[in-house]
Amino acid sequence: MSYSKATDQKWQQKWVDTNLYKYDENAKGDKLYCLEMFSYPSGASLHCGHWYNFAPIDTWTRFKKMQGYNVFHPMGFDAFGLPAENYAIKTGIHPKDSTLKNIDIMTKQLVAMGANYDWNYSLNTCDEEYYKWTQWIFVQLYKKGLAYQKEAPVNWCPSCQTVLANEQVKDGCCERCDTPVVQKKMKQWFFKITDYADELLKDIDGLNWPEKTKKIQKNWIGKSHGSLITFDIDNGTQLQAFTTRADTLYGLSYVVIAPEHPAVAGLTKPEQKEAVEKYVADAAKLKEIDRMSESRERTGVFTGSYATNPVDGRKVPVWVADYVIASYGTGFVMAVPAHDERDYDFAKRYDLPISRVIVDKDGNEQPLPFCEHGKLINSQEFSGMTTEEAIPAIVAKLAKEGKGELTTMYRLRDWLISRQRYWGAPIPMIHCPHCGTVPVSESDLPVKLPYDVEFRPDGESPLKRCPEFMHVKCPVCGADAERDPDTMDTFVDSSWYFLRYPDARNNKEVFNKEKIDRMCPIDMYVGGQEHATMHLLYARFFTKALRDMGYLDFDEPFTALVHQGMILGPDGQKMSKSKGNTINPDIYVDKYGADVVRLFFEFAFSYTDGGPWSDAGIESMSRYVKRVEALFDKVATLSDSGTEMGKREKDLDFVRNNTIKAITKDLDAMQFNTSLARMMEYLNALNEYVQGPVNKTFLNECLKTYVVLLAPFAPHLGEELWEALGQSYSVHNQPWPSVDENALIKNDMVIVIQTNGKLRGQFEVAKTTDKDTIIAMAKEKIKDYLAGKEIIKEIYVPNKLVNIVVKG
RNA sequence: GCGGGCGUGGUGGAAUGGUAGACACGUUGGUCUUAGAAGCCAAUGCCAAAAGCGUGAAGGUUCAAGUCCUUUCGCCCGCACCA
């Protein structure tokens, strides 16, 4: 026997011929919906990251199937997106053609991996049959008031030539291409995810997700408790400021408005006009990364206007300064230099008054700026109160005049989903000169993405240059109208794909409600951590919005979540073409077979950590496979020695059952590496057993157990060995072995001897031995250590150890 | 700055407060071979070794600490002018 790629092909064919992985929703067993994040059909082929995500989870789902779960495990493709479009611009190959070709290649490779997906449930987001429903959901969100258009300063990536969502900007740069992002004022479509901020935050606690990911989402949503305070401005208007420190209001020195704030022009007095306009224009030119820079000095200009402090009627100047962000809170803040670092710096720079109104808890004057909570001074009737007492008290006083309220603010902002690019789902909206913006009739969906389009990016959507696409009749009044030329962020496509899988061929509705409620939520979701604030947040929002519209009945899409680690290059660096340290798994599949590559990924690291690729590691798994085969070859030549079930057999049976027990537990927790370590130990025990006389019947049982345990890890080799044992197809339909607890009961136990916690020796005794005897035996064994020492205490941990506490 | 996480042999990595280093890789020696490779056998935390010392460092709790607590250093990640 010699496992190779040919073995893979033999069994892959048989699996297809026998429909082994066909999902039957009526099959018995508890439903288990397990999903890996679907992949983008990129250029060449499945890379190590895909393998590491998919192969171990394939093992896990096989294990769960053997345990009796009715496992639903589909796979699809996140097929829209910029890389295909950029590739098209470079090579002239149409995104649709390259994408469909890549999907075909990747599907073949997933089959070659030995994955157990039922392809009848597959989907692909660039398919009309799919994006029809993406557009349908957009229309439902629009009707529900959760999709709206707004002119706002947005993040613009000059390289990708499109706007980006906040979640797609990292350190002021485009998450995809690392180009510094600039702010641009544009009319764009948003999804009102902020309506769900509170629920998205609240429900995180109930999720079986990695704590870190939960924390990242909580921080991203960023709830903070504070107050809204209304200021009268001397131009007759009012402005609201959000603050967490209403207790410092008596220390107010000035107020600040963000340069992008629409009220800036109205506040600017004629004599300040030139300076303010220049400042606002300069701020607009700044790249996000420069504006965020810590080393930058805080600058601003006086608008000429004054605001009235609502608690004491004093007038304070209104400044415009870019240290205030238009999109957080109200874009207008009260400045208390004595108790805020930023305001302090600013006041120093522009020589604005600084007055202390907070002392520490003990009444001491701390150096300014003092930003901690404390006690109020110089604050009229509130003097002497603590920060915690003063905030509600001051807000209550303001509330009487309608000028204050306690409130919560979120960092989360609405999700900008328009993209000025071609390769995405068109936004199903029509702009009519008479009726305004109206949705496409549902019966007219999908709005098909035209094939022949000049998709060179120039800051405008390529679809704008396609008259056949743009010209349309208004669905309300029938007048000549225009389509929305933008396409949707591809994260929209992936925000609901997991809801489509169970009913992927439904052409009447987005999905059947009864079916989706039965199949969802997803019991186990596996994918990269980089989606913590993007995909995972958007998908939760979609689920809740669809629930509120009555299309489904659950609150959260992903009950449990696991992030696989990352596979690095052999040099320990992140794999990248520019570093030349990429590994193509195909080469190794050809040379060693898919099972060896699977085993390497599963054995080499703990799943959530990942680590560097290693040729030696692959080689070692190949040797393991050869050792397994060698054992089976050897046993085939052995004849029964006629031995009874003696000590050697009992010892082997112990290892067998111990292996079952350990692997059942470890695999459940996705600890593939330790599971395989147990398999190697079991193999070593079998090898030792076959050195001597064998009870062939018993040995065959042990080998059958071995193959059944191995099958989820190495599905092709598993079939081959199962066949070699003369068993009937398929090993993957075998039940997961159960532990014979009797076999784990040993007559003897090993007692460890310690003095003061230090190891001094060990011995074996019968399990029935009583405590006093064991302690006496232990003392006898280590009498040399005890000589001349005083015994203070004797500790016996049942069945485990004796610790003698000594002095001297 | 704030918030998380992680530091264990030459390497990847194991260890419900109870034998640290499972299982592998590598290395060394042996065996086989004309020779090499592969296999197989043995050894392998440090120290020549009895003893002793060992989980980034320093304290503490405990009969017993990689594991719990405090301080500290280093690395990684998330957020960051969020009012």
Image (cartoon, coloured by chain):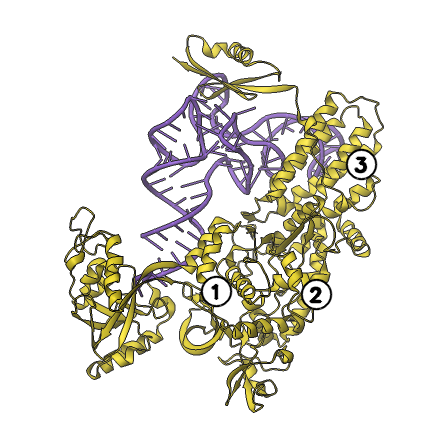
Chain colours: A yellow, B purple
In this view of the protein, which residue sits in the foreground, A450 or A786?
A450
Cβ atoms under marks 3 and 1 closer than 8 Å = no
Residue A492 seen: yes
- Mark 3 or mark 1: which comes first in sequence? 1
Q: Amino acid at mark 3?
A: Asp
Q: Position of residue A13 (x, y in %)?
A: 80, 55
Q: 10 Å neighbourhood of mark 2: few (<14), some, or many (≥20)?
A: few
User: How far apart are the two marked residues, 3 and 2, measured between alpha carbons?
Assistant: 38 Å
Residue at (22% x, 59% y) in the render: A248
> On the image, numbered disc 2 is attached to which residue?
A104
Residue A356 visible to the viewer? no
Task: Locate residue A694, reporting x and y percent.
Answer: 80, 26
Secondary structure under the numbered disc 1 in the rendered image:
loop
Q: Nearer the viewer, residue A168 or A194?
A: A194
Tag on residue A175? 1
For the residue pair A142 and A253, the one nearer the viewer reads as: A142
Q: Chain of mark 2?
A: A
Under mark 1, the amino acid is Glu
Residue A740 place in picture, x, y as percent: 70, 30
Gap between marks 3 and 1, in whole Å? Answer: 54 Å
Q: Are marks 2 and 1 in contact (CB under 8 Å)?
A: no
